[in-house]
Image (cartoon, coloured by chain):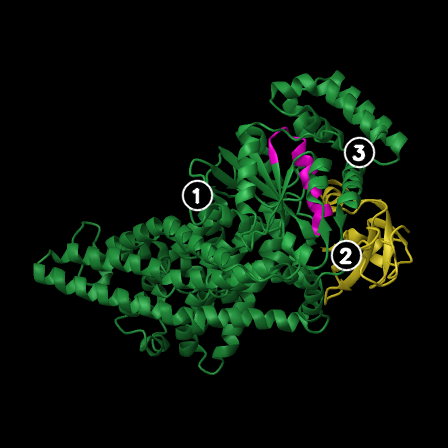
Chain colours: A yellow, B green
């Protein structure tokens, strides 16, 4: 699946970043690299571009560019996806006492 | 000592710069640099300066801003780097830091917005983070002016004692590690000859930086060896060169952060932002809100606030002119010399000053919109519309301001992140019909379309936009080819703007305009006065008819025969429109021997001067022809070349002529 197809509110894991030149460099620099978890937040009123959440911040990219990024759907609950306060990981377990 | 201030966009860099320097700052002039950087004297250390470099995310040489920063560090060799990092967004911010740390310059990291992290229950172990990164990390809050003194002290210490970053390896054992090490070994001599850190050079070469390979003077053999090492890395690691290096950096950062950073749960700043965004970027609310905000800014700038100040200034200038006039008359000064002072110099000064309130008030609003983070949302919301003409959503605001006044609109293109977008937008702004053209439209619609005035005006505005779009598509394809900047943009949390930053920006813009435009406008105003006052034999003329300006008007008049208005009085009026568009009607009124309020009636009854068809052509011509000198001066500033600005003027006049011609021919059919 490509990132432009990711449903709003759903998360996925990046598997491959395509594109070339300045665009690709920019995507990688902004932290869109394989294994990164990414969430689709919303579409612009005219349907394009889209807002994404990645590495704890919001980013907007155009659909045509998002189509160059391959993702794999990930089962991540809809909670805010920063690290867990106890274990520092994205474990999303409210009762986490540390560890996994 | 000289310090370079480097950091991402939206990380509080400008706020920190203002805290470090107070108001003691000026625009730096670095050779060959089109992106401006400010230089300021550090408040507590008068001998030291800090250079505010453009906000960037990486040190690849893909954008002008990245090149500027990189070249500044490599060529100007600052004594130290102050790298500002947004603690609430630490992973992505450290990505740039890792690149800076390989450059072999004493560096200190200013960890900004620590108050926000702590306030939300997060924690960052500063000591451990310092160890992991191998440089001193100082927690600060630029907005609250906390930790700044310690930051300066640490930076000065690092710079004076030449304390280099201690960690050089950001790779763990593996293919990337091997590749970096063999390449940096290979290029060590070349790099050292250029006074460049070998590790920095190696990483950039592996990323595929052709320019750097050229600069280092690598021979074919060495290049091949590097390519071979890269190929080996790619096959072993499974990631291509660009991704492999980015991956290495983020791996290191994730690792370092997992040991030193305890993320807070969702911060209240983010919650607030998300709530605001539901309205400001919501499906049904975004566009109405955007147009509402723009209308409000417009109304406040050109109406409620700007107009009274402009009027006040104008009446002040008028009073000054009247006082000078009578004083010089009493003194018995030669009437011509008096006229030079009053009609030439003082009216020129007056027209410069009349722009100032608009610029100051408008930039107040623009900097508030920018600093709060709304401008990024505007780009997000409007991108779809502007993409079709080869621009991105960021250009929408300068375009809209163009409907008020081209001068601040062209100045506002400065905030665009790519040079191509900046130039293209600056060139398009004059096609948005500015408010100074309204008096012209008003006179002509009153004379020739008394019942359809509003309709004709709307058609004119629309035509300007359409021509602008066509020009954008055309020049986007042929003139400003360069690759468009990728539209990959951060949407920062909404923040309260800092009064200091806003005020400093207003002051900057006002000074910038005065410095750049004052001479040009003054010279133009005196030149027009000269041409209006004397005939070709330098005798003072009593009526406008004999003046040099009229002679030029007569000379140019035949150019307008195909457009249907060949009267010399019209071409003369058009020339005076150069100083300010309003001058077109006032000059025409004088030359027709009437007043501005009577002008519509006179025009209506002089069929030899204008027909309805030629009036249409004239309106289209005034809509599109050369912007006023103030706008030209601003364009020259943005294009940083006289030729570029002159090119725009000639281009616009040609476009205006062609469009007016077409309109005239069509109008004749009815």
Q: Residue furthest bottom?
A: B451
Q: Nearer the viewer, mark 3 or mark 2?
A: 2
Q: Which mark is residue B642?
A: 1
Q: Nearer the viewer, residue B618 or B521?
A: B521
Which segment is the magenta one? Answer: B89-107
Distance in Å between CA atoms under marks 3 and 2 = 25 Å
Q: Which residue is mark 2?
A: A53
What crowding class fits label 2: few (fewer than 14 Cα within 10 Å), some (14-19), or many (20 or more)? many
Is the same chain shared between marks 3 and 2? no
Q: Nearer the viewer, residue B213 or B57?
A: B57
Residue B306: percent from left, percent from top: 41, 68
The total of numbered circles placed on residues is 3
Residue B409: percent from left, percent from top: 50, 58
Instruction: Say which label, 1 or 3, has the lower sequence index.
Output: 3
Is the same chain shared between marks 1 and 3? yes
Q: Which residue is mark 3?
A: B241
| B261 vs B439: above or below | above
Residue B13: percent from left, percent from top: 57, 48
Q: Residue at x 66, y 47 (%)?
A: B484
State which chain disc 3 sits on. B
| B49 vs B433: above or below | above
> Image quarter for residue B470?
bottom right
Q: Nearer the viewer, residue B562 or B373?
A: B373
Distance in Å between CA atoms under marks 2 and 1 = 44 Å
Q: Residue at x 77, y 59 (%)?
A: B265
């Amino acid at each position: 699946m490509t990132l432009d197809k990711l449903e709003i509110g759903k998360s996925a894991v990046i598997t491959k970043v395509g594109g070339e030149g300045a665009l690709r460099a920019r995507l990688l620099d902004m932290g869109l690299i394989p294994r990164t978890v990414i969430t689709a937040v919303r579409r612009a009123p005219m349907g394009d571009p889209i807002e994404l959440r990645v590495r704890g911040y919001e980013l907007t990219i155009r659909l045509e560019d998002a189509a160059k990024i391959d993702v794999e759907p990930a089962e991540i609950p809809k909670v805010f996806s920063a690290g867990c306060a106890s274990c520092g990981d994205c474990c999303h377990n409210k009762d986490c006492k540390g560890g996994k | 000592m000289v310090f370079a201030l480097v950091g991402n966009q939206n990380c509080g860099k400008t706020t920190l710069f203002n805290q470090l320097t107070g108001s003691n700052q000026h625009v730096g002039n670095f050779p060959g640099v089109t992106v401006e950087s400010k230089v300021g004297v550090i408040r507590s250390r008068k001998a030291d300066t800090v250079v505010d470099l453009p906000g960037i995310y990486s040190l690849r040489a893909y954008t002008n801003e990245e090149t500027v920063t990189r070249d500044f560090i490599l060529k100007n060799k600052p004594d130290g780097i102050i790298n500002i990092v947004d603690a609430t967004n630490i992973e992505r911010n450290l990505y740039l830091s890792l690149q800076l740390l390989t450059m072999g310059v004493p560096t200190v990291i200013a960890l900004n917005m620590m108050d926000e992290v702590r306030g939300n229950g997060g924690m960052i172990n500063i000591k451990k983070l310092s160890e992991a990164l191998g440089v001193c990390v100082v927690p600060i809050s630029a907005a609250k002016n906390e930790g700044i003194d310690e930051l300066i002290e640490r930076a000065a210490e690092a710079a004076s004692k030449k304390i280099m970053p201690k960690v050089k390896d950001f790779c763990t054992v593996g293919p990337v590690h091997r590749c970096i090490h063999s390449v940096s070994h290979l290029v060590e001599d070349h790099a050292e000859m250029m006074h460049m850190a070998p590790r920095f050079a190696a990483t950039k070469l592996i990323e595929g930086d052709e320019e750097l390979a050229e600069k280092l003077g690598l021979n074919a053999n060495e290049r091949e060896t590097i390519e071979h090492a890269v190929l080996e890395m790619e096959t072993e690691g499974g990631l291509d060169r660009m991704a492999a290096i980015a991956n290495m950096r983020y791996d290191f950062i994730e690792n370092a952060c997992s040991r030193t950073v305890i993320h807070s749960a969702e911060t209240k700043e983010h919650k607030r932002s998300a709530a605001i965004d539901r309205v400001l970027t919501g499906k049904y609310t975004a566009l109405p809100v955007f147009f509402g905000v723009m209308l409000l800014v417009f109304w406040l700038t050109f109406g409620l606030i700007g107009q009274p100040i402009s009027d006040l200034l104008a009446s002040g200038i008028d009073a000054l002119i009247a006082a000078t006039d009578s004083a010089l008359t009493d003194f018995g000064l030669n009437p011509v010399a008096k006229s030079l002072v009053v009609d030439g110099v003082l009216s020129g000064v007056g027209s410069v000053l009349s722009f100032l309130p608009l610029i100051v008030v408008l930039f107040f609003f623009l900097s508030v919109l920018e600093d709060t983070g709304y401008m990024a949302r505007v780009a997000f919301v409007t991108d779809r519309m502007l993409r079709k003409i080869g621009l991105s959503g960021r250009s929408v605001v300068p375009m809209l301001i163009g409907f008020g006044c081209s001068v601040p609109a062209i100045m506002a293109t400065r905030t665009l992140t790519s040079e191509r977008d900046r130039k293209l937008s600056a060139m398009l702004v004059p096609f948005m019909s500015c408010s100074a053209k309204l008096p012209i439209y008003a006179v002509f619609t009153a004379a020739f379309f008394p019942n359809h005035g509003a309709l004709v005006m709307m058609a004119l505005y629309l035509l300007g936009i359409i021509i602008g779009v066509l020009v954008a598509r055309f020049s986007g394809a042929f003139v400003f080819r360069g690759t468009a900047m990728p539209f990959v943009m951060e949407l920062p949390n909404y923040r309260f703007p800092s009064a200091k930053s806003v005020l400093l920006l207003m002051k900057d813009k006002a000074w910038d305009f005065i410095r750049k435009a004052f001479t040009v406008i003054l010279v133009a105003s005196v030149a027009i006065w000269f041409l209006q006052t004397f005939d070709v034999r330098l005798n003072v003329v009593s009526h406008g008819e004999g003046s040099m300006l009229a002679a030029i008007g007569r000379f140019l008049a035949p150019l307008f025969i195909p457009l249907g208005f060949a009267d010399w009085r019209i071409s003369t009026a058009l020339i005076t429109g150069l100083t300010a568009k309003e001058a077109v009607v006032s000059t025409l009124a004088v030359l027709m021997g009437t007043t501005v309020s009577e002008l519509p009636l006179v025009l209506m009854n002089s069929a030899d001067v204008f027909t309805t068809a030629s009036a249409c052509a004239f309106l289209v011509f005034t809509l599109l022809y050369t912007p006023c000198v103030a706008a030209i001066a601003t364009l020259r500033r943005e294009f940083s070349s006289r030729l570029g600005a002159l090119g725009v003027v000639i281009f616009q006049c040609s476009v205006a002529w062609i469009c007016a011609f077409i309109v005239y021919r069509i109008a004749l059919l009815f």
